[in-house]
Image: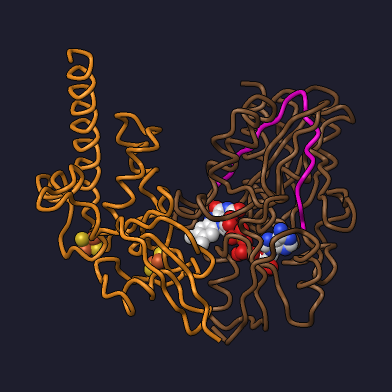
Chain colours: A orange, B brown
Amino acid sequence: MGLSITLTINGVPRSLMLDDPRVTLLDLLRERLDLTGTKKGCDRGQCGACTVLADGRRINACLALAVSLDGADILTIEGAADGDTLHPVQVAFIAHDGLQCGFCTPGQIMSAIDLIREGQAGDDPERVREAMSGNLCRCGAYAGITAAVLDAQRRMRADDDAAQQEKQAA
Amino acid sequence: MQPFTFRRPADLSEASALLAAEGAVALGGGMSLLPVLKQRLAAHAMLVDLSRLPPLQGISATDGVLYVGAGTTHADVAASPVVAGTIPALAALAGGIGDPQVRNRGTLGGVLANADPAADYPAAVLALGAEVVTDRRAIPADAFFRGLFLTALEPGEIITGVRFPVPAAAGYAKFRSPASRYAIVGVFVARGAGGVRVAVTGAASSVFRVPQMERALDAAFTRDALAGLTVPPEGLNGDIHAEPSFRAHLVGVMARRAVAAALA
Ligand SMILES: Cc1cc2nc3c(=O)[nH]c(=O)nc-3n(C[C@H](O)[C@H](O)[C@H](O)COP(=O)(O)OP(=O)(O)OC[C@H]3O[C@@H](n4cnc5c(N)ncnc54)[C@H](O)[C@@H]3O)c2cc1C
Ligand code: FES
Ligand code: FES
């Protein structure tokens, strides 16, 4: 029996037919929709390589049944950039060498985007590390990752302030 | 994962009816159930998705009782102004479960039904003398936890929420596994209307109270009242993280830190 669900993926609404309820969001993205940017590390919630945003919040796609997320708005690494303009978090990961092999990077970036939205970590590197603790990096690029998150957060805040000032001036 | 059928009930009575079937099991956030299914440690014929069931949502406080719906995620408890205004130690506990990805999906009901010996919430539920509310009855915390992954829930019984009496003071401290954040030892201390209750998680096969510490804290609710007090290592868990004698030592240390947190 097929299960029909709808998901908005990277801004595009999609009607999907699942032949089996066991399909996780991760396998749906990678195996059926060719969105292979989201990685499979442990497949059991421990490494964060599969992190995507569901309705704006970071989750492990390997532990979410796709059918259980029917109706959700999903953002993956493929949808982070704005056309050819990289997301500020992507720019910061490149600037700070926040990666070595790059396998954990899509998950790190999606997690960092949500960390910055949450706005709980402030400028404290220790709190950033704690708030990124769901994303492991086997290459140990943590120093660069933390620097990238702090830098992206500063830039995004400055951009927000500038936009705010422009609005007030207009 | 072995094959299963999937159902999302629209209301509580439909959920109860579906879960009455042989082989049916509730699905909360899936943070514990999916790994278990993937490792084929269990197989169920039907998953009944409670994760977005409206009657399991919501947080409210009235007449000295904080009510948290079973479907509430750890992230929502951690961020709730109502929880922060009534039992801040509970908000802090929820904010220290696993990592942000786990907190965005995992639910209060899922943790309690699962009864993992190293889970955090059981310590709060037991120390606060809370009541676990189901689709059939209300179960006092002292009767709820029955052992390793074992609770008083009957087959198909659905946790709908938890009623936490608001204490005068409460604190939680855990010595966590650096990888998973599960409690190697966690101690929740609460001073409520009926006196002080101390509950320990992570140390044994199930959460348990420490009457000797409760008596000491009833006499004087200070860190120093616990000086030299701990529990015997016999029967405590031993694994690669900590042997029983270390866990026994940690119970004393975490209890003192929990009291300090409650007084802060
Ligand atoms: C990497 C990782 C780290 C973690 N770290 C911690 C930690 O530090 N501390 C901690 O406490 N926990 C931790 N957890 C566990 C986490 O808190 C889970 O959220 C929790 O154990 C299960 O909740 P769930 O909603 O995901 O339930 P599920 O996994 O969906 O279900 C678990 C069990 O509960 C049953 N169930 C679910 N909801 C109900 C209900 N309403 N009524 C009756 N039965 C129900 C299910 O049938 C199943 O048997 C961790 C998990 C992961 C993956
Ligand atoms: S692949 Fe999902 S957390 Fe590791
Ligand atoms: S860059 Fe290789 S795992 Fe993180």
Relative to B262, is B70 above or below?
below
In the visual, does B87 lie left or right of B133? left
Q: Is A18 in the magenta?
A: no
* Of the pair B72 and B130, the residue shown nearer to us: B72
Position of B33 with respect to B21 (left or right) is left
- Residue B60 appears in the rendering: yes
Q: Main secondary structure of the magenta part?
A: strand
At a point 33% along the width and 63% down the height, the residue shown is: A49
Residue at the image point whose x is 11% and y is 48% from the top:
A85
Quadrant containing the C terminus of chain B is top right
- Nearer to me, B32 or A36: A36
Quadrant in the picture for residue A169: top left
Task: Identify the image quadrant of residue B5.
Answer: bottom right
Q: Nearer the viewer, residue B116 or B95?
A: B95
Q: Quadrant of residue A77?
A: bottom left
The residue range painted magenta reads B159-175
Q: How many marks?
A: 0
- Compared with B70, B218 (above or below) is above
Instruction: Pick the quarter of the image with the N terminus of chain B.
Output: bottom right
| Residue B148: percent from left, percent from top | 74, 66
For the point 79% across and 28% down, the residue is: B62
Horizontal side, residue B255 vs residue A138: left or right: right
Q: Is residue B172 magenta?
A: yes
- Residue B243: tell me if it is visible: no
Q: Is residue B173 depicted above or below B231 in this figure? A: above
> In the image, residue B49 lies at what x, y percent?
64, 66
Relative to B146, is A16 above or below? Answer: below
How far across and how far down the image is residue A139, in percent? Answer: 22, 62
Ligand 2 shows up in which quadrant of the image? bottom left
The picture places residue A152, in percent across and down from the top left corner, at 20, 38
